[in-house]
């Protein structure tokens, strides 16, 4: 089989919000999490300096706040937020439920072979 398919709702929830999909999808380079956040839910503050993973948080439903290095960033449906590995981040949900897709991967910003440009061969975006 050339692909792996899972439904996030069939993956056990962690910390009452997070559905970690990397293991069931058997990913090697990227982490994917769906976070369905109840009203007033907060994630644990953390960074990814140890594994050098940058993250993108995409809010697909609702409103929430993401604290990045003690700076609140207001998020509304459709917003995407890039966070570098060394920055501390925390989701703080508001009055209503929200839903995020969180994507993490090793940083490629320092790759000498790309001259600061992304390799897009085969990308049809």
Image (tube, rainbow, N blue to C red):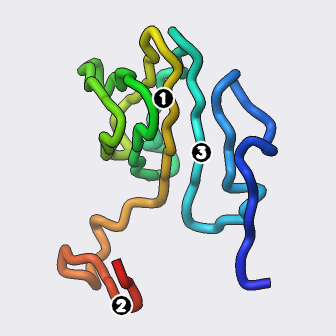
Could you tell me which secondary element the residue under label 3 belongs to?
strand
Among the two numbered marks 2 and 1 on one chain, the one whose residue lies closer to the N terminus: 1
Q: What residue sits 50% from the left and 44% below the top?
A: 101
| Marks 1 and 3, how far apart at CA | 15 Å
Picture coordinates of residue 55, whole percent (x, y): 42, 48
Picture coordinates of residue 11, whole percent (x, y): 78, 43
On screen, residue 74 above or below 35: above
Lateral position of residue 9 relative to residue 32, left or right:
right
Report which residue position mark 3 lands on. Answer: 33
Could you tell me which secondary element the residue under label 2 belongs to?
loop
- Looking at the rendered image, the quarter that the N terminus falls into is bottom right
Picture coordinates of residue 71, whole percent (x, y): 24, 21
Report which residue position mark 1 lands on. Answer: 46
Q: What residue sits 51% from the left and 50% below the top?
A: 51
Number of the label disc, if any, that sits on residue 121: 2
Q: Are marks 1 and 3 in contact (CB under 8 Å)?
A: no
Badge 3: residue crowd in 10 Å (few <14, some 14–19, many ≥20): some
């Amino acid at each position: 089989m050339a692909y792996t398919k899972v439904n996030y709702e069939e993956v056990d929830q962690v910390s009452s919000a997070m559905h970690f999909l990397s293991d069931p999808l058997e990913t090697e380079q990227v982490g994917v999490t769906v976070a369905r956040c109840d009203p007033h839910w907060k994630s644990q503050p953390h960074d990814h300096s140890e594994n050098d993973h940058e993250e993108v948080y995409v809010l697909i439903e609702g409103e929430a706040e993401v604290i990045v290095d003690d700076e609140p960033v207001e998020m509304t449906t459709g917003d995407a937020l890039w966070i570098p590995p060394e920055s501390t981040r925390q989701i703080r949900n508001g009055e209503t439920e929200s839903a995020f897709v969180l994507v993490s991967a090793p940083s490629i910003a320092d790759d000498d072979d790309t001259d600061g440009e992304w390799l897009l061969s085969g990308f049809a975006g």
